[in-house]
Image (cartoon, grey):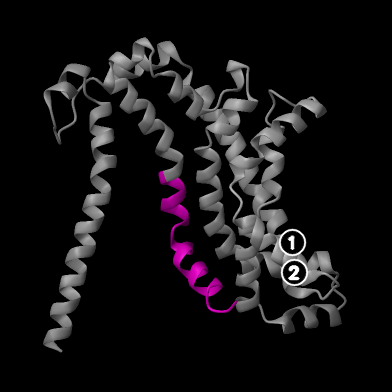
Amino acid sequence: MKDLRIARGVVYFFLVLLVIICFIPFYMMIVNATRSNSEILRGFSLMPSDALVANYETLTNYINIWLGFRNSLFIAISVTVLNAYFSALTAFALAVYQFKGKNGIFVVFIVLMMVPGQLGLIGLYDLSATFGILDTYWPLIIPAIAAPFTVFFFRQYLITSMPMSILESGRMDGAGEAYMFHRLVLPILSPAIATMGIFTFIGSWNNFLFPLVIIRSPRLYTLPIMIRQLQGSPVAQNLGAIYLGIAISVVPIMVAFIFLSKYIISSISAGAVKG
């Protein structure tokens, strides 16, 4: 028993140490956002300073960061919702129904998981130009409906977590397939949706390459593009303003993790039990 307590104490010590190590970069980013350029160049400090307002004015005088924040938030929320809904619908069909070519379709999904999304950038650009939707958000939102990894994850989760007897009981009671999907399947999938929602939101929020190629109008710029514009600009001479812009850009990611992280472990462990 004593050895067990010692081992547990050692594990907790290293876990706390790991948390501190992971938290330090975020804390330093916030601290440096409150410091002037000269203070940052003088060296490391754990104490905030009083240059936050000046840094914010310097930043907002060059870019409309809240416009970029709103644009990125709109795209990220739209992508997350569409990705979750249509992936759940596809996973439901692959997990429940028996039809010709089902296994072949699932193999295609697995293969597509291995293909980098950047390989389709030129094709997406040409297709968007053909349909006349360049310089809009449609090319950034619509492709999110097709998400092979999310479909794979949801399918595995349904196979391990949803008893088929629930659907049989629903059919016996006269419930339609759409009704059962929305009232039975989606609640069961909610932990998996929350988990993949975090990763989808973060991926869309941090997306830089695709908006850079598709978007041309400054009023439609996303936050990563605006932050990139700071390099080589007069604002780049003020490191505090750069840190402040980066700090603002990571706020939604941290909020998403705070409210949804409790679902990650449960859904991943449930979805990985059975293949």
Q: What numbered label is drawn on residue 179?
A: none
Name the spot of residue 106 as percent of width and height, x first: 72, 66
Crowd band around label 1 with a 10 angstrom C-alpha radius: few (<14), some (14–19), many (20+): some
Residues rendered magenta in the picture: 254-275
Residue in front for this viewpoint, 52 or 210: 210
Give the side of residue 175 with respect to residue 106, left or right. Answer: right
Find numbered disc 2 in the image and state the secondary structure of the residue it sits on: helix
Give the side of residue 98 with respect to residue 164, left or right. Answer: right
Find numbered disc 1 in the image and state the secondary structure of the residue it sits on: helix
Q: Is residue 194 magenta?
A: no
Up-down: is 185 above or below 255?
below
Magenta segment main secondary structure:
helix
**Alpha carbon separation for disc pair 1 and 2:** 6 Å
Name the spot of residue 233 as percent of width and height, x first: 39, 12
Crowd band around label 2 with a 10 angstrom C-alpha radius: few (<14), some (14–19), many (20+): many
Q: What numbered label is drawn on residue 90?
A: 1
Residue 210 seen in this snapshot: yes
Q: Is residue 262 magenta?
A: yes
Residue 93 seen in this snapshot: no
- Image quadrant occupied by the N terminus: bottom left
- Look at the numbered discs 1 and 2 and tell me whether their residues touch, using CB distance below 8 Å: yes
Per the image, the residue denoted by label 2 is 94
Residue, far bottom: 1
Give the side of residue 225 with respect to residue 258, left or right. Answer: right
